[in-house]
Amino acid sequence: MAAMQEIWVWLSYVAASVTFIVGLKMLSHPETARRGNLIAAAGMTLAILVTLFLYRSPDGQLLGNRGWIFAGIAVGTAIGWVAAKRVKMTAMPQMVSLFNGMGGACAAVISLMEYPHHDFAPGSWNLAAVIIAGLLIGGTSFSGSMIAFGKLNGNIGDRRFSGQVMLNLIMLVLVLALGAYLTFQQSPNMPLLLLLTAMTLLYGVLFVMPIGGADMPVVISLLNSFTGVAAACGGFIYNNQVMLTGGILVGSAGTILTILMCRAMNRSLLNVLVGHFGSSSPSAGAAGEHGAVKEISVSDAAVLLSYSRKVMVVPGYGLAVAQAQHTIHELEKLLEEKGVEVSYAIHPVAGRMPGHMNVLLAEADVPYNKLLEMEQANNEFGTADAVIVVGANDVVNPAAKTDASSPIYGMPILDVSLAKNVIVMKRSMSAGYAGIENALFYDPKTRMLFGDAKSTLQKLIAEVAAN
């Protein structure tokens, strides 16, 4: 009977691992992402149920305390469900950071619980190394994610001081050294383990605190990869194949995404972690040194859009802040009824997390085939009669190409200035998240349409309908 249960557990874990891989593959395209998420969730549910009812410990015992386990699952599910239902799109990056941090905390707690029960006999250092690694990586991911949450939520600002990079390096060396010392101990040393835990949490705070807000998408994906690696360590500890597979997939996907986003910003990961891009520093360049901006009225903008053949929309974080994704979709449909071709240009690091604009527009039921990635969009701008920039700033800033002294120099941008006309919708002339002035606003082709994005778009819709 026990042997048959072991076979079923193994087969179920294989099936769950397959659903993770299939689900991750389907997440690569918007049209299949939701279904892929459900498939992976079904695999996780299968793995949990099989573990609770069929998995046996090395001494042949089934899991106990199921009542407490199911109570914990129920409470966690209820909290996650309500939080996910109520979260606004502007707060989605914060929620991703929060949930990711919880995963890191879980991996760290596993290491804390398993360390005293580890066999400290000579030659068992390899398992001890995995336990310590899970604590270090999971703890760093937890505290770092909490700081990222605070930054994204506006509760915590960038904190830098002279010698901070050196301090972080010293802290990292001390944490690794103490972790290595505990790995080769012949008996448990809980006081030192608790000290290591505190140092790890502190390092996570110091690690993320100085990183500029504009770099948060990269940091989120990096911390996500940390959580995956920490979960994989848990899989090694328990010799659990499905936990190992899930952790490896999350860790590798997060790492690949981090690399891709760094390439999209034309910056190295090291530069992101120790650089100063995205800080709350004063804007580069004196205001008005590029000349005067030109404004456009809502009625004139409506006429321009109504009589265009092709219009492209560049969404940014300002669109999310104004909760205007449904309104821009309404304008898109109205223009198409007039025979105007409308599409959206998506920059990889627009918003506050990877894919933020894609998620935002998907919520408004914008067709996926209208979302153009940066390379494709840049090939289309030259044929556009008008481009509407809604709440985007740094990702359309020509300084990335023309000003070698700019902090964003070299970052690939959306070449909106190639279009015949550019309408920039902003509340004011304030700098973007990178804290630098945008020369696009002074381009002869550019017209500024000031005001709240949602209310301005609603007025624009009324004027377009009247034309």
Image: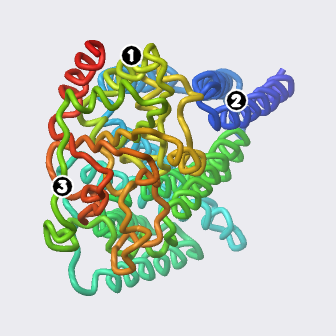
Which sits earlier in the primary sequence, circle 3 or circle 2?
2
Are dots 2 and 1 in contact, CB under 8 Å? Answer: no
Residue behind mark 2? 55
| Direction from residue 393 to residue 373 in the image, left or right | right
> For the point 79% across and 33% down, which residue is it?
14
Are dots 3 and 2 in contact, CB under 8 Å? Answer: no
- Kind of residue sitting beneath label 1: Leu
* Image: 253 above or below 47: below
Residue 259 position within the rendered picture, expressed as x and y whole percent measured from the top left: 58, 61
Residue 375 position within the rendered picture, expressed as x and y whole percent measured from the top left: 59, 51
Residue 140 position within the rendered picture, expressed as x and y whole percent measured from the top left: 42, 61
Residue behind mark 3? 293
| Direction from residue 81 to residue 372 in the image, left or right | right
* Image: 285 above or below 291: below
Which sits earlier in the primary sequence, circle 3 or circle 1?
3
Q: In this view of the protein, which residue sits in the foreground, 234 or 353?
A: 353
Which image quadrant: the C terminus?
Answer: top left
> For the point 29% across and 13% down, which residue is it?
465
